[in-house]
Amino acid sequence: MTMRRGDRTVLRARLEAQALDGALNLGPAQVVERLLAVQAQDFAAGLWAIGVRSSGATAADVLGALEDGSIVRSWPMRGTLHFVAASDLGWMLSLGVPRVRSAIGGRHRQLGLDEATLARSRAVTEGLLAGGGRTTRDELMAAHEAADIPTTGQRGPHLIMELAMTGVVCWGPPAGKQQALVLSEEWIRSPRVLEPDEALGEFLVRYLAGHGPATLADFTWWSKLTVAQAKRGLAVAADRVAETGTVDGATLWASSEQVAADVAATAEHAVLALPGFDELLLGYRDRRLVLAPEHFELIVPGGNGIFLPLITVDGRIVGTWRRRVTAGGVAITPAPFRPLSQRASAGFRRAARDYGRFLGLPATVAEERPLD
């Protein structure tokens, strides 16, 4: 797929917005605040999505931001786990959750999760966690079972998701290799409170600041808000956004601050080892700018919904990579769509070493295994 001059300009701007061009000096909490939400159903991948955008951060630094309460994880939109700034969670839930809860209502009825059961679940949870308590998933499920609330099958995951989407709990401080559940009201010390229209404008502006230039179709896909809500947000935030061009007849929008910034050209052969489910790909409905359509099935083998880690050169996805972590190090195997150039291959080895540094482990890179 040949890129046009305009495509390259948009891609450079998106790399800058997503803090992937190396020009910003952001810590983990600042990265999450900039992107508004970072997909995180794969916990380890979500940590690296933050780390690769932070200046010299380690996994311990990202976990520290979870421990100090500046970042939390929940289901703020799309029924998908994301890292968000703790202060943003409440107003995001108010916009992003209603359609999701409506969509899963039938599944709740199938599972016997009626309003009375959900109310009892909330009471059990609040009783367990009140006063600064922390709990693991298994401990919370055991408390439910002890209260005669069955958690077998899919009932347990749906109970936790319901508790989170209604703002009772969120995934907060680290607990082993995952996170502990805490009461949102206690854990989140300074929640932002926004009026509905104000929240719509904030949602759109913050998405564009961390992902733009993008179309309203990209935004509605990412947020799962309605077109009407997106247009209302655009009207509310008219003085904070600007048109930057068109793509296939659709208007591209960016935050006013982004438009005013001087975006430098991406360094030639800038190579990154991005995690699976990365926002550079999943942050948009139309993904052709970063990924040739014929290669999509190589990112999600078998269409199983699992997005593999990405190799990018100048923002374009050129392959995938896999890792094997042991106590002694991390072994990384690149699988480019086509053999990488010598310079790109050297760039990927540097990117792999940076991932090892993030983990605090030495990284070794195996021989390329081209997919084509």
Image (cartoon, rainbow, N blue to C red):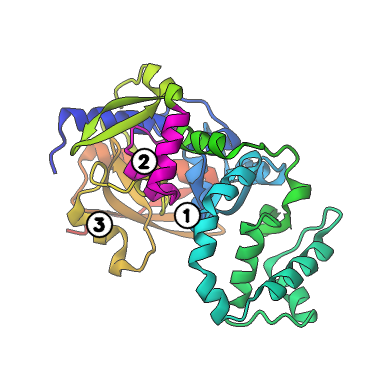
Q: Nearer the viewer, residue 325 or 165?
A: 165
| Residue range (magenta) | 209-237
Identify which amino acid the numbered label 1 is placed on. Answer: Val
C-alpha separation, residue under disc 3 versus residue under disc 2: 18 Å
C-alpha separation, residue under disc 1 versus residue under disc 2: 17 Å
Locate residue 160, reporting x and y percent.
Answer: 64, 66
Q: Is residue 367 above or below residue 107?
A: above
Q: Is residue 205 above or below residue 78?
A: above
For mark 3, what is the residue?
296
For mark 2, what is the residue?
272
Label 1 packing within 10 angstroms: few (<14), some (14-19), many (20+): many
Identify which amino acid the numbered label 3 is placed on. Answer: Phe
For mark 1, what is the residue?
330
Q: Nearer the viewer, residue 254 or 201?
A: 201
Q: Secondary structure at mark 1?
A: strand
> Within the magenta stretch, is there residue 259?
no
**Lateral position of residue 328 relative to residue 167, left or right:** left
What predominant SS class does the magenta segment belong to?
A: helix
Locate residue 171, reporting x and y percent.
Answer: 66, 55
User: Which one is earlier in the sequence, the residue at label 1 or at label 2?
Assistant: 2
Q: Secondary structure at mark 3?
A: helix
